[in-house]
Image (cartoon, rainbow, N blue to C red):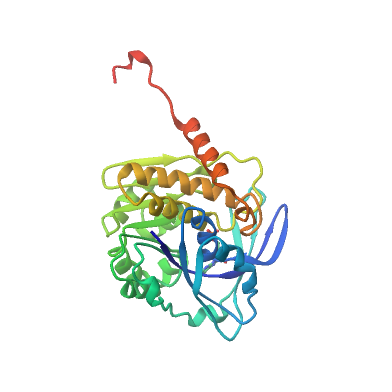
């Protein structure tokens, strides 16, 4: 049930109203692995530069993240820096320094090619397609993308959509990709172009799962202490894929529960800087929050409703 993830492994400098972290562990593959490894084994493929403190990733290795597909290349690591507004809902990217990531050509190790569960983190869609050429017969492929690729790699992204089971994007990206302002219309547009399922993430307002025949809403978990939203989307993906891989099925009920596990892992990600909250996060804490989600959303119809 191993999950393969391909994505960025970065050093992030993040400023929020509550503080600042310099060169902290970041990147889509890092956040994804930190969350998904709480459910089962993960195989990570990415690249870092010669300056990367690879020892800092040992906590991932200790809990089952196979880092043998993490290449260390001569040069500078990928660095991203951003600053968040007071309400933490919007962020400005201050700098993206690609370093060795500019030349990244994912090489999937032979031992990873039988992966059944594949997450294509936010990288050039040409590279995401290239990863799919290297894996044998995945059971479920999910991918992420961002405004940059929708702008400059639309053709490749459209080809990719024809080959994945699920696309995970935020509301702005869904609107940009489809050209539809209305999210239901945007979802229909996207589902008609390939993926069987779509998750639209709406930050603190939750996430929505669209299938061809249904819509499922998960609220955002009402946290009182949000510290750093960086990586919430990738942690969501890690919780989502981790849960699916652990249960081994993708029926609608499984997908709905996966959205809740995604929301739970995303909610933990924002409680501390970087991947700090995942270091000692326990299975009990995850299950407690899943139960709180259920309590928040379940309701009874009045007995006389006739339904
Ligand atoms: P999220 O908050 O879920 O959107 O993820 C933020 C993470 O994505 C940060 O840790 C960054 O290092 C990483 N990131 C930012 N820009 C890029 C990019 N252009 N390509 C790959 N990863 C990126």
The location of residue 52, given as percent across then percent down, is 63, 76
Residue sitting at 45 percent across and 70 percent down?
Answer: 123
Viewer-proximal residue, 103 or 65?
A: 65
Find ligand 1 in the image and state its quadrant: bottom right
Residue 248: percent from left, percent from top: 34, 52
Q: What percent of the width, then of the height, locates residue 168?
A: 41, 56
Viewer-side residue, 262 vs 284: 284
In what quadrant of the picture does the N terminus appear? bottom left
Rendered view: 275 above or below 99: above
Which image quadrant for residue 276?
A: bottom right
Q: Residue furthest top?
A: 304
Q: Which quadrant would the C terminus be assigned to in this image?
A: top left
In the image, residue 272 sits, relative to residue 147, either above or below, namely above
**Image spot of residue 75 (x, y percent):** 60, 85
**Which residue is rendered at x = 31% and y = 58% of the image?**
165
Q: Which residue in the rendered view is the most extreme toward the right?
A: 19
Up/down of 18 relative to 69, above or below:
above
Residue 186: in sight, yes or no? no
Q: How many marks?
A: 0
Residue found at the far bottom of this picture: 74
Q: Nearer the viewer, residue 265 or 283?
A: 283
- 160 and 30: which is toward the camera: 30
Residue at 34% over, 41% down:
253
Residue at (41% x, 62% y) in the render: 2
Q: Is residue 294 visible?
A: yes
């Amino acid at each position: 049930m191993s999950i393969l993830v391909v994505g960025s492994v970065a050093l992030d400098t993040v400023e929020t109203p509550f503080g600042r972290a310099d060169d902290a562990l970041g990147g889509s593959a890092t956040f994804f692995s930190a969350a998904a490894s709480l459910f089962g084994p993960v195989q990570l493929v990415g690249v870092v530069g010669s300056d990367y403190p690879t020892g800092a990733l040992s906590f991932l290795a200790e809990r089952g993240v196979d880092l043998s597909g993490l290449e260390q290349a001569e040069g500078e690591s990928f660095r991203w820096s951003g600053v968040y507004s007071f309400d933490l809902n919007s962020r400005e990217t201050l700098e993206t320094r690609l370093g060795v990531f500019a030349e990244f050509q994912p090489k999937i190790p032979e031992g990873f090619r039988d992966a059944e569960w594949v997450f294509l983190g936010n990288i050039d869609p040409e590279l995401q397609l290239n990863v799919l050429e290297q894996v044998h017969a995945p059971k479920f492929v999910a991918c992420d993308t961002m405004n940059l690729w929708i702008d400059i790699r639309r053709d490749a992204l459209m080809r990719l959509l024809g080959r994945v089971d699920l696309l995970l994007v935020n509301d702005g990206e869904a609107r940009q990709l489809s050209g539809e302002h209305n999210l239901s219309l945007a979802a229909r547009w996207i589902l008609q172009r390939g993926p069987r399922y779509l998750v639209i993430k709406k930050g603190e307002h939750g996430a929505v799962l669209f299938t061809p025949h249904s819509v499922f809403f998960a609220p955002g978990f009402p946290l009182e202490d949000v510290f750093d939203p960086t990586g919430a989307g990738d942690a969501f993906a890690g919780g989502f894929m981790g849960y699916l891989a652990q249960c081994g099925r993708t029926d609608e009920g499984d997908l709905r529960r996966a959205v809740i596990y995604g929301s739970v892992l995303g909610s933990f990600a924002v409680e501390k800087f970087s991947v700090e909250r995942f270091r000692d996060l326990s299975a009990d804490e995850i299950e407690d929050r899943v139960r709180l989600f259920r309590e928040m959303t379940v309701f009874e119809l009045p007995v006389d409703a006739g339904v």
